[in-house]
Amino acid sequence: MSRKARRSTVRSRSYEAIAEYYDAEYESNQILDNDVPFMLQHLPKRSQSVLELCCGTGRAAIPIAQSGHRVVGVDYDANLLEIARRKRDSVGIEPRQLDLVRGNVLTLKLGKTFDFAFLIFNTFLNFTTADEQDQLLDAVVAHLKPRGRFWIDIFYPDLTILAAQHHAHFDSATFYVPSLDRSVHRVTEIERSADRPQVQRVTFHYTWASTDGRINREKIEFDMTWMFPRELERLLHRHGFFIEQMYGDYDGSAVTPESSRIIVLVKKG
Ligand SMILES: C[S@@+](CC[C@H](N)C(=O)[O-])C[C@H]1O[C@@H](n2cnc3c(N)ncnc32)[C@H](O)[C@@H]1O
């Protein structure tokens, strides 16, 4: 039976950020100081055509376009894309250097192919079913030139998190959102799914105080999966990719059980 015929109707609960919070929320995240510079080291110096899947507010797409590559960023969230466009325009990057397109990466059909595609900041793990992962990788293959390269960056599973069914207060952070003149506190809750294998429900709980002292609460919920290096390697291989590099961190070290990241550069066969 073909992969298409086997596709199930189970879908991940998708990540939908509170757009105004996104950049402020992640500003002090150390991963984000290092992921784009490290990826840029692996891009050829001569200008490449680059596709960013799930580009959000252009955090990565903008500096990559600024370093001379022609970038297309795709995201399904119109509010995040609007922020990305504003940021792009404010640094004087032309739309022909960075095109921002609204679309679902699972069904993407841009009608062109690229030298390089990338999906970073754990986003591959938002696609929690085998069907979605296949759909996404099919879309990547369809948008790469022959011998095009794909860069994917996910976290190495943390066994202490996986061991517990429920974490109520994980990774708390406070951040200031200039556009709203608001300080927001975020607490993360993680619950392992009882009925879906290898799936966690992640909830970000946000609280902030109005000027009259009222406490406001917001939350977003989404699904995440986890993968070990061999699992990712075999999946990429099954989609016709050959591993060129695999790193366990942005210092270029190899993947070990103590690694924090799984960063893979693959080539389309
Ligand atoms: C964690 S954010 C990463 C954003 C950006 N790549 C970065 O590193 O800052 C994940 C992004 O994936 C987008 N996204 C999730 N599912 C998507 C889908 N099926 N199609 C397009 N975008 C999607 C969300 O809107 C969000 O912008």
Image (cartoon, rainbow, N blue to C red):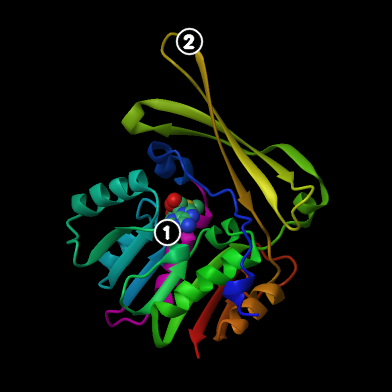
Residue 195 position (above or below residue 208): below
Q: Which of the image's four quarters has the N terminus?
A: bottom right
Disc 1: residue Cβ within 8 A of ligand 1's nearest atom: yes
Q: Is residue 256 visible?
A: yes
Question: Which residue type carries mark 2?
Answer: Gly
Which residue range is magenta in the image? 28-48
Q: Residue 22 placed where, x, y %?
A: 43, 43
Q: Indicate the quadrant where residue 41 lies.
A: bottom left
How many numbered callouts?
2
Q: Indicate the quadrant where residue 158 lies.
A: bottom right
* Residue bearing the label numbered 2: 213
Q: Which residue lies at the image location 38% right of the left edge and 55% below the top edge?
A: 59
Q: Residue 226 placed where, x, y %?
A: 68, 60
Sequence-wise, the earlier of marks 2 and 1 is 1
For disc 1, the neighbor class at 10 Å (few under 14, some 14 to 19, many from 20) is: some
* Residue bearing the label numbered 1: 104
Work out whether residue 196 or residue 162 is closer to the camera in this orientation and state it: 196
For disc 2, the neighbor class at 10 Å (few under 14, some 14 to 19, many from 20) is: few
Q: Which residue lies at the image location 58% right of the left edge and 59% below the top edge?
A: 127
Q: Residue 120 placed where, x, y %?
A: 49, 63
Q: Residue 239 placed where, x, y %?
A: 57, 81
